Amino acid sequence: MLIRKDLCVGCGRCQPYCPVGAIHFEELKSAVDQEVCYECGTCLRSEVCPVEAIEESPFVYDYPRALRKFFSDPNATHKLTGIAGRGTEESKSNDVINRVLPGEVGMAIEFGRPTLGMDLTNIQKVTRAMAKAGFTQIEPENPFNDMIQNYETGDLKPELMGEKVLSAIMEFKITPDRLGLALRTIKEAAKEVDSVFVVDVYTRVGPGLTIPREVLDPIEAEGYTWRPNAKINMGLGRANKRKDP
Ligand code: SF4
Ligand code: SF4
């Protein structure tokens, strides 16, 4: 994001809107620290500037900086998938996207959070650990595929190492017998990660809305507590992809 010095009157109203403190005073006007800025667009969307001095950089979609925009601005549409908001329809919407089938376990690692993003070097610590443990496949429509240099090692593309994101979600699916190893690997990798991330586990519910024990057992065995979250389809959507076998 940029602030036009010729227009800015130095009122400072925009500064509290930046979730990462990238806007500061410079000679009585506001300026954006380009290294700190995630290109989330919050300052511009807030429409708080009385003189419209805040404007998007013409280079915001240049590669590799565009990564910041795709994974930090909920209004940005990822160029690879054409989907806004982290570039994926997300396994959370499984009732319509049909990604996780009976007998499968969907997993997601949600890196960073608003106000506390994550740089790609930290994300790579997790992708490398997962690859080393044999988790080398990523959901085909997940934008992480565009960031991976080597699936066997979990290396990300080297040109991305200077970039960071407010929130990116890596999705994959496994069989239930590998869930314990996946959780153990992620927990171990977390010790090296200098930020926060969330781990999601998805499954189809069984008869009577029961959660399969083959999914719950490894979660509990690895020392995690769990709570059931669900998105309820009110009948306006229907499964539109990948029919059950
Ligand atoms: S685009 Fe986001 S991170 Fe950048 S200055 Fe504006 S609010 Fe801060
Ligand atoms: S709100 Fe606008 S005029 Fe006020 S400091 Fe920010 S950019 Fe400058």
Image (cartoon, rainbow, N blue to C red):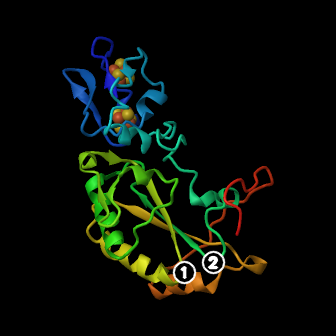
In the image, ligand 2 is in what quadrant?
top left
Provide the residue designation for mark 2: 103
| Circles 1, 2 touching at the beta carbon (< 8 Å) | yes
> At label 2, which amino acid type do we have?
Gly
Q: Quadrant of residue 22?
A: top left
* Residue at position x 60%, y 60% in the image: 92
* Residue 29 % position (x, y): 26, 20
* Residue at position x 61%, y 62% in the image: 99
Sequence-earlier tag: 1 or 2: 2
Identify whether 62 is placed above or below 71: above
* Residue 3 % position (x, y): 32, 22
Identify whether 78 is placed above or below 233: above
Judge: label 1 CB < 8 Å from ligand 1: no
Provide the residue designation for mark 1: 176
For the N terminus, which image quadrant?
Answer: top left
> At label 1, which amino acid type do we have?
Pro
- Who is closer to the viewer here, 132 or 51? 132
Extreme residue in the front direction? 245
Asked whether the viewer can see residue 11, the reply is no
* Residue at position x 43%, y 41% in the image: 70
